[in-house]
Amino acid sequence: MMDNVVRNLRVLWRAESIIADIRLRQAITRSGLRGVAALLGAFAFVMGNMALFFALEPSWGPIWAAAAIGGLNLLLAVVLLVTAERTKPEREMELALEVHNIALQALEADALVVQQQLIDLKEEVRGVRQAIVGFVRHPIDSVLPGMLVPLAGAVIKGLKKHEERNG
């Protein structure tokens, strides 16, 4: 019984560590993509500001070049943010969660068995306690029912022998 509990605890621990590893990798990937998107967004903001600055200048060249680069960086940042949000856990995560749930169910079943065994043990101890208390309080009453039949048989035999001698 305890082997099953230990095995299930090990499986549960392994499933938890796999789940944590997968979640960590996913968080790192999302964070990296978000970081790049934030960097590109900041660069787009700087380029947009530069474009606004150059828009005030009378010539078209530097203005539209800075605006085009700023717009492209902003578009790339949006694409990266959407990609980061749509990143789903791999098949490993589903499998790890399934193993995790199976291990929890097995532990719950083992716990119910152990609980029932403890209840049975408690009832058995209670019965032994009552028997001991009964014997200590009334030792003759406890022994008498078991000795009544042999004692009655001995008395009857003694009476028969007594009648045969007197008879």
Image: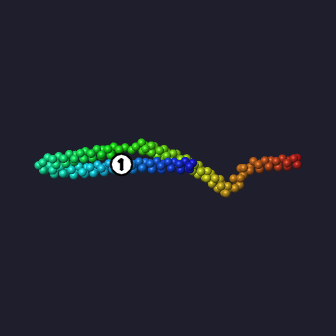
Left or right of residue 26: residue 126: right
Q: Quadrant of residue 94?
A: top left
Q: Nearer the viewer, residue 119 or 153?
A: 119
* Coordinates of residue 91 in the picture (x, y in percent): 42, 42
Left or right of residue 45: residue 85: right
Q: Which of 82 and 139 is in front in this view?
A: 82
Residue at 30%, 46% in the rendered image: 81
Q: Nearer the viewer, residue 42 or 118?
A: 42
Residue type, numbered disc 1 = Thr
Observer able to see residue 54: yes
Left or right of residue 106: residue 44: left
* Coordinates of residue 13 in the picture (x, y in percent): 48, 50
Q: Nearer the viewer, residue 44 or 86?
A: 44
Q: Residue furthest left?
A: 58
Q: Residue furthest bottom?
A: 136
* Coordinates of residue 33 in the picture (x, y in percent): 32, 48
Left or right of residue 98: residue 30: left
Dot 1: within a 10 Å radius of its alpha carbon, few (fewer than 14), some, or many (20 or more) residues? some
Residue at 71%, 53% in the rendered image: 143
* Coordinates of residue 93 in the picture (x, y in percent): 42, 44
Residue at 71%, 55% in the rendered image: 140
Instruction: Look at mark 1 in the image and give the residue it sits on.
Output: 29
Q: Which element is circle 1 on? A: helix
Q: Residue furthest front?
A: 61
Disc tally is 1
Q: Quadrant of residue 75?
A: top left
